[in-house]
Image: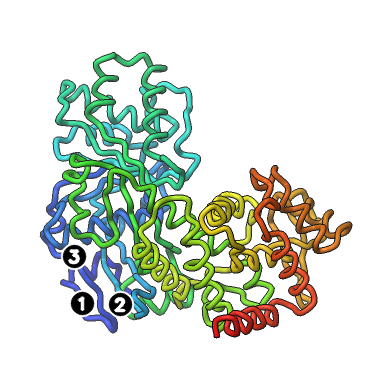
Amino acid sequence: MDTLNKQLALAAPSTTVAVAWPTPALFELPEKVLQFGAGVLLRGLPDFMIDEANRQGVFNGRIVVVKSTDGGDATAFERQNGLYTVCVRGVDDGKPVEENVVCSSISRVLSAKSQWADVLEFAKSPDLQVVISNTTEVGIQLVNEDIHLTPPTSFPGKLLAVLHARFVAFKGDVNCGLVIVPTELIPDNGRKLEAIVLELAHRNNLSSDFLDWLESANHFCNTLVDRIVPGKPDDATYTQLQADFGYQDDLLTVAEAYALWAIEGGERVSEVLSFHRVAKGVVIRPDITLFRELKLRLLNGTHTLSFALAHLSGCVTVREALENEYLARFVHNLMLADLLPGIPYQVDEKMGQRFGMQVLDRFRNPFLEHRWLAIAMQGTMKMQMRNVPTLVHYYQQHRVVPHYIALGFAAYLLFMRNTTTGPSTGEGEVDGHAYTIQDDRASYFADLWTKLSPAELTNAVLRNTVLWGSDLTRLPGFADKVSQYLTQLLEEGAPATLAAFFTKKTALAN
């Protein structure tokens, strides 16, 4: 089978499926972006979006990628001339989406280990405008090091070395600063990266002129990225796709249809990151807190309050739950009736509803196998971060029990009934089938379940301020309702409890 690069030379051959190929002009665009990392999230989100804009004559820039080591994906990029296929699969507005794009936004890949001089040389390019990174959460860490090493060890050290080389090359010209866009999944990633880079500059005794330029000429942007990018599909799907395409692609990447890249910035950032004008899913705002809250409370929060009920009902994946009548209604109403009104941030209701419907489309994606037990990992910590602030704010606004949250919380308590197998693991059981619990509080719940009745256990857990940061038994009626649902789940099982829950809701509505 031909390689992807050879097939491009054959002028985009006919295939059994549609593939969007790059035009020759796209390979002539200047290199405007320095990117640290070449993982699937970067390939499937920012790099894909830049390619999308380039095809429409906007931004018109390519990416130089820096990898920390030789080998691995670097050899595949070299072999394929930077090309790779993104297979977009999902649901958008209730309709299935299948799209195949050969991306040409990456011009070359450099090894920090063996080509650091080339990286520093590119730092001096007048075309360079943007730095993108995804070095995992541990990448944005302060390491006390000499930035003149070849290369520095840490990502902030490498970035500081690049910025210093640029400052020297352009003699401190304020017009030659960069827009720096980290995509690491930590809150305030841009602000934290800037603080580390500044501290490291001080520790390296760099000049006051450089420090002034670093702060005034460069823009470190907080960002939020949200797209599921599994990367290479399973072997059978991979083999079939290559047969359909008629070429071999060692970098083939699968991504869901939904995409969000929220970037915090003003006019200068919007001007430089011009791809936001045409690339679907890119938003630039002075404050992106709203997008973070919507994702955390509606998508992540719904996951956390649904995993137990879905698992106890016999569903393995999120998609299976959305194919179950009662679970689908539970997830929909939990998100839009209880969680949306409880978001501790001002949210336009129409925008929240629209975001929620997009989340439901993502949950229904037939191309993704998102397992509930994976979502359940460290569920107690996630419950505290994602759902407790929403619950408390809901009470402040409405003064009534949010029934969907109460039922989801009761199911979580039952899910956590286990036999401890390790410091942060336990084994639960449903319908004679064992499942593994991975939660730092597994032993805590195992101990409570051996000593307390459902009502006593509910009260003990809800009043635990170490877990939740506040005493949740003070929320009027919440403990009683959770206890009631927990008893019902124990006696009748999750499917019957759900059926009765909605039968009662229907009767009350009539």
Alpha carbon distance from label 2 to label 1: 8 Å
* Mark identifier at residue 461: none
Outermost residue toward the right in this view: 451
Quarter of the C terminus within the rendering: bottom right
Mark 2: secondary structure:
loop
Percent coordinates x, y for residue 48 in the rendering? 28, 59
- The answer to whether marks 2 and 1 mark residues whose Cβ atoms lie closer than 8 Å is yes
Q: Label 3 amino acid? A: Pro
First in sequence: mark 3 or mark 1? 1
- Residue at 70% from the left image edge and 42% from the top image edge: 466
* Mark identifier at residue 22: 3
Question: Label 2, on which residue?
Answer: 246
- Residue at 69% from the left image edge and 73% from the top image edge: 312
Crowd tier of the residue under label 2, counting other residues whose Cα lies within 10 Å: few below 14, some 14–19, many 20 or above: some
| Residue 466 to residue 394: above or below | above
Percent coordinates x, y for residue 73 in the rendering? 39, 54
Question: Label 1, on which residue?
Answer: 13
**Which image quadrant is residue 254 in?**
bottom left
In this rendered view, identify the residue nearer to me: 305 or 192: 305
For the question of whether residue 253 can be seen, the reply is no
Percent coordinates x, y for residue 385 in the rendering? 57, 49
